[in-house]
Amino acid sequence: MIKSLRDLFRSKTPAERDMDPHLAAAALLVEAALVDGVYVNIESDMIAEILLEAFDLEADKVDELISEGETLAEEAVDAFHFTRHAKKLPMDKRVAIIEGLYRVALSDGQRSDEEDAFIRHVASLLYVDDIARAQARQRAEARQA
């Protein structure tokens, strides 16, 4: 009985368990959409498009990742737990996540200071330097135009 109680209190939260880096990326993209307090269909569609393009995943897998990512992002306290897992991806995929974060931020037609701060924070946690982050922002803005 004492062992089962100990195990119960030691159980890890979903963010502390080993996580698929693609799921972590999906959760980060959802968090970017939630930063401004509004999560609309256009942002969800943009997240699906980003996951399809950046990671070359099947549509069913993308839908699953978005669903799980939404749940995780709503329960998240900070982005650190997700970036910890997303750092397992190669640098070009991490830069693709940053570009995706900018695309999500721009998808509703407005970019807020809070969204910019969130993206800068995530970029630093993913070890994406300022030059690569700025280039990712420029690519996202060019796609939006």
Image (cartoon, grey):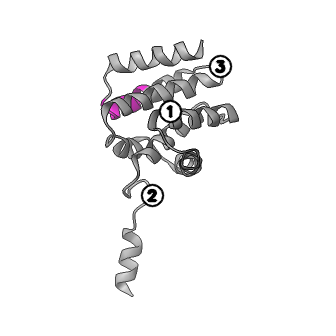
Q: Is residue 134 above or below residue 28?
A: above
Q: Which residue is mark 2?
A: 14
Judging by the rendered image, the residue that carries numbered circle 3 is 109
Q: Cβ–Cβ below 8 Å for labels 1 and 2?
A: no
Q: Which mark is residue 98?
A: none
Q: In the image, is 133 to the left or to the right of 61?
A: left
Which residue is under mark 1? 53
Badge 3: how crowded within 10 Å, few (<14), some, or many (20+)? few
Instruction: Find the magenta span and give its range.
Output: 120-127
Measured Cα–Cα span from mark 3 to mark 1 = 21 Å
Mark 1 residue element: helix
Please state which amino acid type lies under the numbered disc 2: Pro
Dot 1 surroundings within 10 Å: few (below 14), some, or many (20 or more)?
few
Residue 37 appears in the picture as rendered: no
Q: Nearer the viewer, residue 49 or 117?
A: 49
| Residue in front for this viewpoint, 61 or 89 | 61
SS of the residue at dot 3?
A: loop
Q: Main secondary structure of the magenta part?
A: helix
Identify whether 45 is placed above or below 10.
Answer: above
Comparing marks 1 and 2, which lies closer to the viewer? 1
Judge the density around disc 2: few (<14), some (14-19), many (≥20) Cα neighbours within 10 Å.
few
Rendered location of residue 11, percent (x, y): 40, 68
Label 3 – label 2 distance at C-alpha: 32 Å
Q: Earlier in the sequence, mark 1 or mark 2?
A: 2
Q: Can the viewer see residue 5 in this picture?
A: yes
In this picture, is 35 found above or below 113? below
* Quadrant housing residue 143: top right
Image coordinates for residue 132, horizontal then vertical, percent: 35, 20
Asked if 2 appears above or below 8 in the picture, the reply is below
